[in-house]
């Protein structure tokens, strides 16, 4: 029996964001945008979804006069990502 | 293979693509970290070497040992150059911090405080083997960094530095200063350039 894939992670941009954050303590919006190649609007929407699900936490700060959003993966997000990778491996029989 | 459609406008992934995406993103993030990892070591390495040569030249020309105060410019100059370079990078590339990077930064801050106290003690306590202690601390820092990220050139150059630092217990006077410059080249500049070259080579091979 295959495990059901987490629909929140089974999307290109959200999965890309989680894959970047899994290797890091934290990353800001510009860094995530550069790494994923996403448009600011789309990235913002997907980050909000991950934040609402409790997979990431977002901290809005200022660098000088410019607003800055810093993202971190949460323990819940870490667990969801781990389960997702296990499920994918099950499908592919890796 | 199952394929889920999450929502219109969002790219649909199959399982193979998902795994490839995860691998690619983690790999890109790691390569980005490797590319930037050498920068602080290169900056502080070159600033230390140039300061050593400046102190040596100034004392040789004037005979005034107060020029030893120039050593205190290393952390100030190093941080200013690093801050300027990082600020430019952050504007265009964004900022990130790895778990390992955070721990390594904390270790180097601790070592920098210890080095500063040693430098201060050298002005107050005579004789004080400041060159020995500072070179030893920097070497331990480089080796520790190498052991944490499992990078051999850092471990080897750090260990060479630890051995070299004991030579400063026997060398005295103005001739110590060019030896400090050489030691910093071996301990910091050489391994940082090796890391930089390796990271650039890896990035080029991916293009």
Image (cartoon, coloured by chain):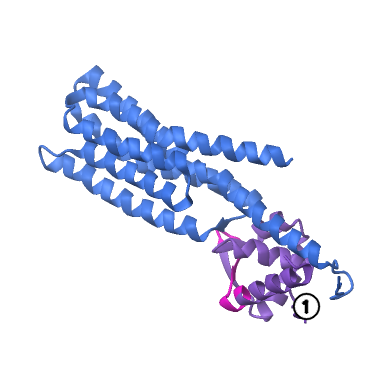
Residue underneath mark 1: A7
Q: Nearer the viewer, residue B75 or A91?
A: A91
Q: How many marks?
A: 1
Crowd band around label 1 with a 10 angstrom C-alpha radius: few (<14), some (14–19), many (20+): few
Q: Position of residue A64 (x, y in %)?
A: 55, 58
Q: Position of residue B150 (x, y in %)?
A: 47, 49
Q: Nearer the viewer, residue A87 or B186?
A: A87
Colour blue, chain: B
The quadrant of the picture occupied by the C terminus of chain B is: top right
Residue A16 in the figure: left or right of residue B154? right
The quadrant of the picture occupied by the N terminus of chain B is: bottom right
Q: Position of residue A28 (x, y in %)?
A: 61, 61
Residue B103 in the figure: left or right of residue A19? left
- Highlighted magenta segment, given as a residue range: A63-78
Give the quarter of the image for residue B206: top right
Mark 1 element type: loop
Of all residues shown, which one is farthest toward the top? B61
Residue B139 belongs to the span the image colors magenta: no
* Residue at x 48%, y 37% (from the top left corner): B192
Residue B137 in the figure: left or right of residue A29? left
Q: Nearer the viewer, residue A2 or B30?
A: A2
Q: Say which chain tag 1 marks.
A: A
* Residue at x 74%, y 78% (from the top left corner): A6
Q: Colour of chain A?
A: purple
Where B44 falls versus A51 (above or below)? above
* Residue at x 28%, y 36% (from the top left corner): B163
Question: Looking at the image, can residue A68 be seen?
Answer: no
Q: Position of residue A41 (x, y in %)?
A: 78, 66
């Amino acid at each position: 029996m295959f495990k059901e894939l987490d629909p929140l992670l089974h999307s290109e941009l959200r999965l890309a964001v989680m894959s970047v954050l899994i290797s890091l303590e934290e990353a800001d919006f510009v860094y995530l945008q550069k790494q994923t190649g996403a448009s600011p609007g789309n990235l913002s929407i997907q980050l909000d979804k991950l934040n609402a699900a409790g997979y990431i936490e977002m901290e809005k700060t200022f660098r000088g006069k410019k607003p800055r959003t810093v993202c971190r993966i949460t323990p819940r997000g870490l667990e969801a990502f781990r389960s997702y990778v296990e499920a994918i491996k099950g499908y592919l029989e890796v | 293979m199952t394929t889920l459609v999450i929502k219109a406008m969002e790219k649909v992934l199959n399982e193979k693509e998902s795994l490839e995406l995860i691998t690619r993103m983690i790999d890109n993030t790691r390569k980005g970290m490797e590319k930037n990892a050498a920068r602080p070591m290169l900056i502080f390495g070159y600033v230390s070497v140039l300061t050593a040569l400046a102190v040596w030249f100034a004392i040789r020309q004037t005979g005034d040992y107060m020029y030893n105060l120039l050593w205190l410019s290393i952390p100030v100059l190093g941080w200013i150059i690093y801050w300027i370079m990082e600020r430019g990078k952050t504007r265009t590339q964004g900022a990130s911090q790895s778990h390992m990077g955070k721990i390594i930064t904390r270790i180097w801050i601790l070592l920098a405080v210890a080095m500063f106290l040693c430098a201060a003690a050298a002005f107050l306590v005579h004789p004080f083997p400041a060159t020995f202690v500072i070179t030893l601390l920097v070497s331990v820092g480089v080796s520790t960094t190498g052991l944490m990220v499992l990078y051999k050139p850092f471990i080897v150059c750090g260990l060479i530095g630890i051995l070299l630092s004991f030579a400063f217990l026997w060398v005295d006077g103005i001739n110590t200063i060019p030896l400090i410059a050489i030691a910093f080249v071996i301990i910091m500049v050489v391994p940082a350039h090796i890391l930089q070259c390796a990271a650039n080579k890896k990035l080029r091979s991916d293009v």
